[in-house]
Image (spheres, rainbow, N blue to C red):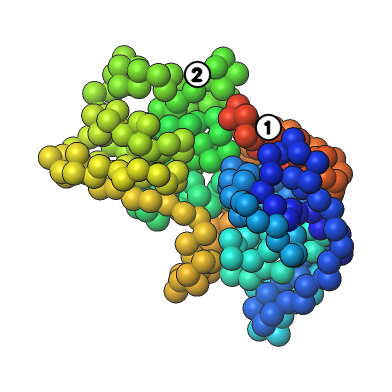
Amino acid sequence: MKAIGFKTSLKIEEQESFIEFETSKPTPGAQDLLVKISAVSVNPVDFKIRQSAAKDTVLETPKIIGWDAVGIVEAVGENVKLFKVGDEVYYAGDLTKQGSNAEYQIIDERIVGRKPKSLSIEAAAAIPLTALTAWEILFDRIRISAEKDKGKSVLIIGGAGGVGSIAIQLAKKVAGLTVIATASRPETVAWCKEQGADFVVDHKNLVENVRQSGFEYVDFILDFVDINSYWDSVVELIKPQGHIASITGSAEPVILNKLKSKSVSFSWELMYTRSMYQTDDIQEQHVILNKVADLLDQGILKHTLKETLNGFIVENFKKAHQQLESGTTIGKIAIKF
């Protein structure tokens, strides 16, 4: 099969930052699907791993990255129960295995969902990683429920990015929250409003801008940008006994004792935890992806695809990574094979 990967971590402008190569088609294990891939999308995790996975070294075998895919099941392992050959599927993959930037991929059926029927393959490819991340941070980490939390406020830092775009929709349309999102350019402000944000504030002078919107404190805060850059602001804005959650990690320690006087909870979210550690509830990702597919097919959620690049070629991956690295991407970029 054809695949696109890299042997060493290079700046995206360099000729061999991505290379095309031939490799053997993988064979599914007992609980795996072999998927013929039709489209993928790109996420910040892609360029972060490309920049770091082969730093100051040259790999013998090129590394295949990519963690969003749509395709058709071509073969199944002997213990597979959730899917059959010919099914259209979508998924976000597993950090511990080869990625989706290839013609075929094997994937554990428990982290795969049915492709939303109403979406094109490229629109569906834009959904899995961001939807799983947003769903888990809202409903698994903070444990928000429409019954007890409807009408409460959530501040989403980074509203126009891939995760922010779907998190706004889930928070508003599924959880029934009042959504405040951050955005600073006219086009990102407009995008956040399209996704359903009730208020959009500039991330600069965050405390002042949130308070000018009528909120002394907010019940929940989701960080999709850089938790330490906003730490003092979120500590100030979070309501006593509220909950802050972040997906961004931090090179410096997060000063959690600043939350003590307010008895505030803090959570990390990593969408790969379930697959990486083979948790007891790993199949919950199959359930979430199917719920999201239903919500998309019912028109409650809408896809967040902003741009499609046509063709499984090195140039398209370079272009997508270049755009993501610029930090100005709105919504998602997909590559249709």
Task: For residue 226, say whether it is visible.
Answer: yes
As drawn, 193 above or below 7: above
Q: Quadrant of residue 74?
A: bottom right
Give the mark nearest the N terminus, 1 or 2. Answer: 2
Amino acid type, residue under disc 2 in the picture: Ser
Task: For residue 305, say whether it is visible.
Answer: no
Q: Residue at x 42, y 52 (%)?
A: 269
236 sits to left or right of 44: left
As drawn, 292 above or below 193: below
- Residue 101, image x and y in percent? 75, 54
User: Element at badge 2?
Assistant: loop
Q: Residue at x 75, y 64 (%)?
A: 61
Amino acid type, residue under disc 1 in the picture: Gln
Q: Residue at x 47, y 62 (%)?
A: 273
Point out which mark residue 51 bears: none
Which-is-in-front pick, marks 1 and 2? Answer: 1
Q: Nearer the viewer, residue 13 or 313?
A: 13
Mark 1 burial class by Cα count in 10 Å: few <14, some 14-19, many 20+: some
Q: Nearer the viewer, residue 28 or 66?
A: 66
- Residue 6, image x and y in percent? 74, 53
Q: Residue at x 25, y 42 (%)?
A: 255
Q: Nearer the viewer, residue 99 or 183?
A: 99
- Residue 35, image x and y in percent? 77, 65
Q: Which residue is labeled 2 in the image?
A: 184
251 sits to left or right of 134: left
214 sits to left or right of 109: left
Point out which mark residue 323 bears: 1
User: Element at badge 1?
Assistant: helix
Instruction: Check the picture and name the quadrant holding the N terminus.
Output: bottom right
